[in-house]
């Protein structure tokens, strides 16, 4: 059997690794972007000079050889499900018995005049980093559009080069649809403390420049001069080259619970996949490192004939707002639903917080969200999965703490929040 | 120039050893303050650095100087056999007990208790970090002066293999040498004759001076900051075996949160590919880990934690 994987991001590489664990079949992994699978989430650290590109490679060369995972650096021009083959950019044809699409995302455009000017840049691909490196030279001011985590990272990257950043967010708060207001405010405060000019409720109407970006015009007609515009308004599944293959798509490649597309022997995993029946409170497309890795593992089992439905599990994510870490386990929606009580503690420094959501009637905890404090994933997930009562959770809260030794502990203060 | 200080501390004029000790300590203190500033938000790094600075200044500089002033042997309470190999050589033991009466007996007793009881116990409880990155003077220099070079350590599998062969060979050599010297001394020198001095001088020159001194510290900008600790130190070898097999110490990976960015491996001074464990969600239990905690400090997702023991649900 020959399994071909298109894409060598975390979904593709995880799939390859787990297929090898289960089977002796031939594995080929194709990527146009990079011969070496690397960590996309580390791009910012390369730009900031903390890491070399080689340090971000997922595995060393011997790993791919030892596990007999063939790597091909090429663009896939065409997928032909009937003949069970693919055509690469140089015209060569590769046949497959099973095909895994792990093509990831592409950054979305915002659709304003001037968007194609040199100096308007996304942050997604490895090549974006080279462009950003070149563009940021000699630039004094930049505008970042789009208030997600990538926007925050891009702002931090540019600030590290001494560039003045105006960070434009369409909503009334930072990540207002994902974050509860207190945490959103805290993140916004931290970003501003690092010198970023954070503007809410502001949209871009036009990008002006003569051969290169010179300024942006906002929806209120304000013109902001800048030498660089970073667009981080989101990503969409990368499915363009699959039109006409008969694979059913909506916003992504539609997959069933076994991550099978509508075409036999073609599977999809990671950002490009769209679940036909997502779990309650979960999205059909979750473009996230952790979900892509989990899907890669599941798709490997299904390809190898050990059918296993993809389980979205208990939601978790982590991020960073400059030096302040953020973690979430379970459900902590931006607006606390009725029937749920939200216990919130914030340190007087305004840089640490813990939020625990629980069912008002039964007391069962449903979610944890922390800023500036590390919590232990296994413990939080266990409490959520077993519906542990909030009193029991607060009593044993120190078990959840994952901060380094000698850090100040706040369990008593958090417990006190419930009583007040 | 350093004469007044040397006379004040040791009761005698400065010599090359005083200059060496003074420069060493001054560098550790100066670069230690820089290090503390760099990791100012991290309490573990603060306490650890205060500790290595304290042990360098007090135990490796002031106390040995004061002992010289008191006409006692220049003794380093924070180094033990087999790193400070001569403390359990028959010559040294004879010299301490013969010339320094009760003090000498105490020093030999201290050295033996530390080597055979305290080191194994503390390493079982805390991992080798209690010594390597909290007490040891070599560690003090590596953690402070060597900090800018920590990412130069070789992370390849080949280097790991060389490390295991080299460090255990040095341990084997010093254990055999010590045993041989004791048997020889029991037999009134009939086995080795005049060779006993040559053996101990050769070890002292090759391992004690060239490896630990010149290559171990002088080559920071080429091999990284912990060459001696990683490839040579027999003390580290013993504690490494205890840490790997029996210690409660481990670096815990927080569930599936690793994003494989590579910061942990990049900044590991011992050349451990921390990421290869973290991205699989595995705990890190490695003989060489000195528990400096930098992997945990540079992790952008807070995935790593140095722990004594595990949390059970």
Image (tube, coloured by chain):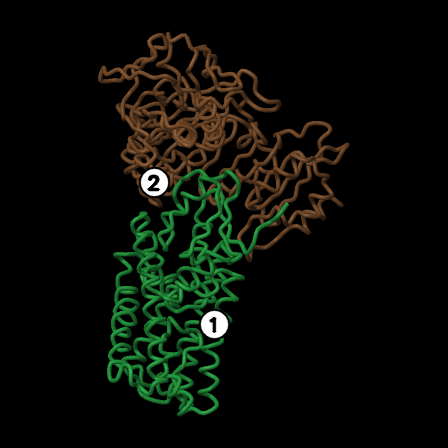
Chain colours: A brown, B green
Q: Residue at image x 39%, y 19%?
A: A238
Disc 2 to disc 1, C-alpha distance: 46 Å
Left/right placement of residue B218 relative to residue A315 reads: left
B158 w.r.t. A255: above or below: below
Residue A221 in view here = no
Please tell me whether mark 2 sits on a helix, a strand or a loop: helix
Q: Quadrant of the N terminus of chain B?
A: bottom left
Residue B116 in view here = yes
Residue for badge 1: B116
Residue A108 location, x and y as percent?
41, 21
Q: Residue at image x 25%, y 17%?
A: A89
Label of residue A106 in the image: none
Please tell me whether mark 1 sits on a helix, a strand or a loop: helix
Q: Nearer the viewer, residue B11 or A350?
A: B11
Q: Decide: marks 2, 1 in contact (CB < 8 A)?
A: no
Q: Quadrant of the C terminus of chain B?
A: top right
Few, some or many C-alpha atoms within 10 Å of disc 2 (few <14, some 14-19, many ≥20)? some
- Which mark is in front, 2 or 1? 1
Residue A1 location, x and y as percent?
36, 20
Q: Chain of mark 2?
A: A
Residue for badge 2: A46
Q: Chain of mark 1?
A: B
A19 w.r.t. B90: above or below: above
Few, some or many C-alpha atoms within 10 Å of disc 1 (few <14, some 14-19, many ≥20)? few
Q: Nearer the viewer, residue B44 or A47?
A: B44
Do discs 2 and 1 share a chain?
Answer: no
């Amino acid at each position: 059997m020959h399994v071909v994987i298109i894409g060598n991001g975390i979904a593709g590489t995880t799939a390859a690794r787990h297929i090898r664990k289960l089977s002796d079949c031939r594995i080929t992994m194709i990527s146009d972007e990079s011969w070496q699978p690397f960590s996309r989430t580390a791009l910012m650290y390369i730009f900031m000079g903390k890491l070399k590109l080689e340090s971000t490679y997922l595995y060393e060369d011997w790993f791919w050889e030892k596990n007999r995972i063939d790597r091909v650096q090429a663009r896939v021009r065409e997928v032909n499900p009937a003949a069970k083959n693919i055509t690469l950019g140089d015209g060569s044809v590769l046949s497959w018995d099973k095909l895994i699409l792990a093509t990831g995302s592409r950054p979305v455009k915002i659709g304003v005049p001037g968007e194609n000017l040199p100096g308007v840049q996304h942050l997604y691909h490895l090549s974006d980093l080279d462009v950003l490196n070149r563009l940021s030279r000699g630039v004094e001011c930049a505008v970042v559009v789009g208030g997600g985590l990538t926007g925050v990272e891009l702002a931090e990257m540019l600030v590290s080069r001494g560039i003045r950043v105006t960070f434009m967010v369409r909503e009334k708060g930072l990540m207002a649809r994902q974050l509860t207001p207190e945490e959103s405010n805290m993140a916004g405060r931290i970003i501003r403390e690092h010198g970023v000019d954070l503007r809410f409720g502001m949209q871009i109407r036009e990008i002006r420049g003569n051969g290169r970006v010179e300024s942006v015009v906002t929806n209120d007609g304000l013109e902001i001069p800048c030498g660089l515009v970073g667009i981080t308004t989101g990503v969409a599944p990368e499915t363009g080259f699959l039109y006409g293959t008969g694979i059913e798509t909506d916003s992504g490649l539609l997959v069933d619970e076994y991550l099978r597309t509508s075409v036999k022997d073609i599977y999809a995993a990671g950002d490009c996949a769209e679940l036909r029946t997502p779990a309650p409170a979960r999205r059909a497309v979750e473009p996230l490192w952790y979900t892509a890795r989990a899907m890669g593992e599941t798709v490997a089992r299904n390809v190898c004939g050990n059918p296993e439905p993809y389980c979205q599990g208990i939601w978790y994510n982590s991020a960073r707002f400059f030096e302040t870490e953020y973690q979430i386990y379970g459900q902590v929606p931006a607006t606390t639903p009725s029937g749920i009580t939200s216990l919130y503690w914030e340190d007087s420094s305004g840089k640490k917080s813990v939020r625990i959501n629980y069912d008002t009637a039964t007391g069962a905890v449903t979610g944890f969200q922390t800023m500036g404090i590390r919590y232990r994933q296994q413990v939080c997930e266990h409490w959520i999965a077993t519906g542990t009562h909030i009193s029991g959770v607060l009593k044993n809260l120190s078990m959840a703490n994952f901060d380094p030794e000698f850090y100040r502990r706040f369990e008593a203060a958090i417990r006190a929040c419930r009583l007040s | 120039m350093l004469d007044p200080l040397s006379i004040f501390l040791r009761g005698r004029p400065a010599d090359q050893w005083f200059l060496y000790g003074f420069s060493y300590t001054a560098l550790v203190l100066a670069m230690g303050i820089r290090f503390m500033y760099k990791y100012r938000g991290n309490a573990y790094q603060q306490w650890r650095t205060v500790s290595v600075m304290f042990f360098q200044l007090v135990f490796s500089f002031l106390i040995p100087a004061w002992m010289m002033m008191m006409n006692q042997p220049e003794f380093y309470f924070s180094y033990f056999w087999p790193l400070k190999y001569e403390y359990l050589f028959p010559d040294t033991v004879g010299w301490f007990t013969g010339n320094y009466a009760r003090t000498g007996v105490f020093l030999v007793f201290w050295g033996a208790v530390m080597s055979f009881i305290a080191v194994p116990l503390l390493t079982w409880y805390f991992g080798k970090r209690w010594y390597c990155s909290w007490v040891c003077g070599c560690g003090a220099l590596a953690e402070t002066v060597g900090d800018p070079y920590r990412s130069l350590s070789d992370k390849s599998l080949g280097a790991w293999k060389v490390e295991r062969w080299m460090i255990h060979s040095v341990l084997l050599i010093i254990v055999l040498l010590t045993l041989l010297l004791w048997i020889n001394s029991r037999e009134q020198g009939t086995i080795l004759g005049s060779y006993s001095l040559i053996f101990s001088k050769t070890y002292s020159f090759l391992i004690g001076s060239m490896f630990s001194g010149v290559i171990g510290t002088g080559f920071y900008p080429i091999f990284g900051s912990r060459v001696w600790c990683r490839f040579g130190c027999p003390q580290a070898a013993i504690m490494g075996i205890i840490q790997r097999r029996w210690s409660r110490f481990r670096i815990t990976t927080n569930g599936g949160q690793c994003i494989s960015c590579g910061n942990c491996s990049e900044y590991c001074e011992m050349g451990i590919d921390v990421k290869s464990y973290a991205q699989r969600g595995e705990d890190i239990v490695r003989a060489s880990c000195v528990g400096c905690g930098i992997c945990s400090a540079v992790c952008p997702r807070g995935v790593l934690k140095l722990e004594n023991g595990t949390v059970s649900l």
